[in-house]
Image (spheres, rainbow, N blue to C red):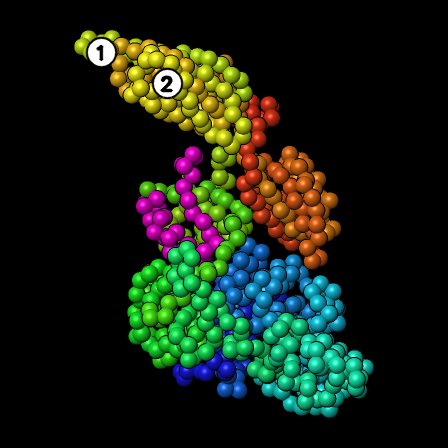
Amino acid sequence: MKAYPTSQIRNLAVIGHGHTGKTQLVSSLLYLAGATQRWGKVDEGTTVTDYDEDSIARKMSLNQAIAHCEWREHKVNLIDTPGFAAFLPHARPALRVSDCALVVVHAAKGVEVGTEKTWAYANEFITPRMLVINQMDKEHADFGAALDSARQTFSRAIVPFTLPIGQEANFKGVVDIVHMKAYEFDERGRAKEIDMPAAGRDLVDKERERLVEVIAESDDALMEKYFEEGTLPEEDIVPNISKAIAASRLCPAFAVSSNTLVGLSTLLDGIIDYAPAPDTHAEEHGKASLDDGAEPVTRGYHAEEPFSAYVFRTVADPFAGRINVMKVISGRVKSDATVQNTTRGSAERLGALHSMQGKQLDKIDEASAGDIIAVVKLKETQTGDTLADKAAPVVYDPIEYPEPAISFAIEPKSRQDEEKISAALHKILEEDPSLHFSRDPQTKEFILSGSGQLHIETVVEKLRNRYHVEVALHPPKVPYKETITARAEVQGRHKKQTGGRGQFGDCKVVFEPLARGEGFKFEDKIFGGSVPQQFRPAIEKGIIEAAQGGAIAGYPLVDFKVTLVDGSYHSVDSDEHSFRAAGRKAFRNAIEKVKPTLLEPIMNVEVVAPVECSGDIMGDLNSRRGRVQGMEMRGKSQVVKAQVPMSEMLDYQSKLNSITAARGSYHMEFSHYDPVPGQIAHKIVEQARAEGRIRAEEEE
Ligand SMILES: Nc1nc2c(ncn2[C@@H]2O[C@H](COP(=O)(O)OP(=O)(O)OP(=O)(O)O)[C@@H](O)[C@H]2O)c(=O)[nH]1
Ligand SMILES: [Mg+2]
């Protein structure tokens, strides 16, 4: 394959709500442009970008997939992204590296929650946008209604570049309002010019006028001219469209059907003519190194600049190994080049360069600024890393992923599964930076966190199908803690006389409650030498050890202070070990007097759902002991913010799905610890007893 100059590359992220037809759109564009011989269909599991078995089985995209085609001597890179809530975070990196987004909207449904979320991602990266109103052939398709919903939700600057001729089964062509021409399409998607239909002419003229207005509004000089002359000449319109789109002052909309190919060639023409090329992009800002205070460095999207690239996706291919996908930001690069991974400070030899067609890698010899390429088997490179010319280093900020919203405990089913799980998860995590895997130090469980239940379930499937690791999924145990509520002075005395040298340690300590979050404090207030200096830390150690095992239900005891006030020792028998035992004993003696209680983690919860569900959502949160803190509108959705005990949120996803018909999503993060109400605490203590988690008294 040839190398394309920067100005002849278009990078498009295909984003939007689930099931709007993004994957089918990409597949149909590839077929139309001749990049694939066969027309891949989502429903037959034969598309280029839903290539892995999980996507095919679920008929939904689970991560970003990259494809490309050539149209009018330009290389069009398409990044297909997932639309379902649990996988939406994967659309963000695509927006970071694309120069324009195709926002796909369902013609019968209009703007949906996922449209708003991905639109917000595009705002974050200031990615220019084009709207694709897809499924125009479908029952109840209504271009006008879908367009209105987008204009109301996002911007008045959305202007249809094509208007449909016919809808639903009669969708046969489009009117191009930029060039004022009409087209019909044959069954292979080829356009044939026809006469402008008389029907709907008013709308065509109105939208054309709207286009002129929006172009005028995008530039002061044009605005002046528009005011003076009441319109703009043709030669002022077309050349300014691309600029207005690049500045996000205009968002064109296209009517298409990915199932019948109607309107797609006009869309591809629109992409070549109007979607910003990489070199229209503002300079990228980075730093010379990761060191604090490193100099800022900028790179323009030009082949003449030193080489730099940003890695935005990693694929663990069962055959090829690790594939890193990157956008060349500046300069050019040839196969077998040695470059520097400036994020990790190590050299990488690139080997062959590729363009991706889903899972297929097509070799290329060279790539220029702006292109998206794939490289296999780099030593250390991961998603988020920068590769650069060693002589002209630059590091770009990696994309932050949102904190995971939901956690599950995963339990390997057998010993063999336990041995394989870490390596397998390591590979899965490389591909999916929105996942977290950890081991809870308190409960000792393996915790897998992600953006939704479905997300975690797909990981479990992948573990099974790809890595042959079987795990069971449980809600994670709640990391309760314990604390004390009363002050008490106690003695801890350890004495043992069993022939030979004895053991002796004795301390007098005061326990006091501390404020939430203060942890543990120890103060030594002994006057004189009732306990020699060198044994005092042992007393503290003993108390800390004992506090780890809790006082009532086996959870770590926190937020208390211990003051050492007195004690005694024996010149021969006393040693560190004896004083540690004395500390532990002091703790046990204190338990009855300090009134221990249970603490539970309280989460900050944010629920996003359609407005009409907010009453039910609040009612449900109340029944989960939640305290609603506020509500606000976000686009067309309602956001409910509340504080809810973690223990009440373990099954929340399924409840939210049933309240909102799967249109809601939520996110939560730890806020603070609060005492567990009496009745509930009682049950937890009973449970701990039943499970034998309260440590037996230590033998003397
Ligand atoms: N009638 C009709 N059906 C379509 C069209 N485009 C897509 N579909 C169907 O809509 C369903 C969803 O299509 P996908 O391409 O998988 O949708 P998606 O947006 O990629 O979905 P996610 O990856 O889950 O976000 C499939 O059954 C497609 O066959 C279209 O233009 N017309
Ligand atoms: Mg898809």
C-alpha span from label 2 to label 1:
19 Å
Which quadrant holds residue 568? top left
Q: Residues within 10 Å of mark 1 (few under 14, many from 20)?
A: few
Name the side, left or right, on which 320 lies relative to 240: left
Q: Position of residue 347 (x, y in %)?
A: 30, 65
Q: Is residue 186 above or below residue 608?
A: below
Vertical order, 101 against 562 (above or below): below
Q: Is residue 380 above or below residue 530?
A: below
Can residue 129 be seen by looking at this rendering?
A: yes
Span shown in magenta: 416-444
Q: Amino acid at mark 1?
A: Val
Mark 2 secondary-structure assignment = helix
Quarter where residue 642 is shown: top right
Looking at the image, can residue 359 be seen? no
Residue under circle 1? 572
Crowding near the residue tagged with mark 2, few <14, some 14–19, many ≥20 C-alpha atoms within 10 Å: many
Precedes in sequence: disc 2 or disc 1: 1
Dot 2 corresponds to which residue? 583
Q: Residue furthest front?
A: 528
